[in-house]
Image (cartoon, rainbow, N blue to C red):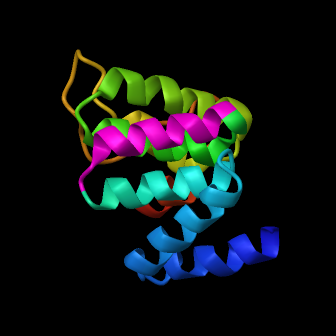
């Protein structure tokens, strides 16, 4: 089913949302706990501004198979849904699973933490390394 899933995921990557939605649902009809289909169906819900549904679906995917990508995507949804504290926690979880994920570090640095508003730019990673995006902005 993984090749079949990859073929179906191609619709989503190409922006063919209705086709991808239908195909992810077909996968879930056969395998209700398919982590990839749950996660990407959640991202489709997010793209359609249904963040409540997106959060639920991505959390289901994480319950089945906790991956850095799933936590990262959940962080995006939570952040844009106005839940910055939860977004920070899941970005940290994504980083703990995949420490070389510069996007998770950037989103973590840009997430509001309750004491300051979200700001564009970047923050230095705790390890002291800079991401490619950070190096590109260096004077």
Helix, strand or loop: magenta stretch: helix
Q: Where is residue 132 drawn, in percent x and y?
A: 56, 59
* Residue toward you, 71 or 54: 54
Q: Where is residue 85 drawn, in percent x and y?
A: 35, 21
Q: Spot the residue most to the front.
A: 29
Q: Quadrant of residue 45?
A: bottom left
Along the horizontal axis of the image, is 100 left or right of 125?
right
Q: Which residue is pictured at 27% across the width and 43% down the height?
A: 80
Along the horizontal axis of the image, is 111 left or right of 60?
left
* Residue toward you, 133 or 137: 133
Please state, as top left, top right, bottom left or bottom right, where the N terminus lies in the image.
bottom right
Q: Is residue 44 magenta?
A: no
* In the depicted structure, whether residue 84 falls above or below residue 57: above
Q: Where is residue 110 drawn, in percent x and y?
A: 34, 38
Q: Please indicate, yes or no, whether residue 139 appears anywhere in the rendered image.
A: no
Q: Which residue is pictured at 53% across the width and 63% down the height?
A: 25
Q: Spot the residue most to the top.
A: 115
Q: Please indicate, yes or no, whether residue 117 appears anywhere in the rendered image.
A: yes
* In the depicted structure, whether residue 63 falls above or below residue 38: above
Q: Which residue is pictured at 48% across the width and 84% down the height?
A: 14
* Residue toward you, 131 or 102: 102
Q: Which residue is pictured at 26% across the width and 47% down the height?
A: 120
Q: Where is residue 32 drawn, in percent x and y?
A: 65, 48
Please state, as top left, top right, bottom left or bottom right, where the C terminus lies in the image.
bottom left
Q: Which residues are magenta?
A: 49-63
Along the horizontal axis of the image, is 4 left or right of 37?
right
């Amino acid at each position: 089913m993984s090749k079949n899933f990859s073929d179906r995921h191609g619709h989503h990557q190409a922006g063919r949302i209705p086709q991808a939605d239908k195909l992810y649902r077909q996968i879930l009809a056969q395998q209700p706990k398919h982590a990839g289909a749950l996660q990407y169906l959640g991202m489709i819900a997010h793209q359609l501004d249904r963040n409540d549904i997106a959060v639920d679906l991505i959390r289901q995917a994480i319950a089945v198979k906790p991956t850095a990508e799933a936590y990262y995507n959940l962080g995006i949804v939570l952040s844009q849904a106005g839940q910055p504290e939860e977004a920070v926690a899941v970005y940290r979880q994504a980083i703990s699973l995949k420490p070389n994920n510069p996007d998770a570090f950037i989103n973590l640095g840009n997430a509001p933490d309750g004491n300051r508003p979200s700001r564009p730019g970047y923050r230095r990673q705790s390890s002291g390394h800079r991401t490619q995006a950070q190096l590109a902005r260096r004077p």
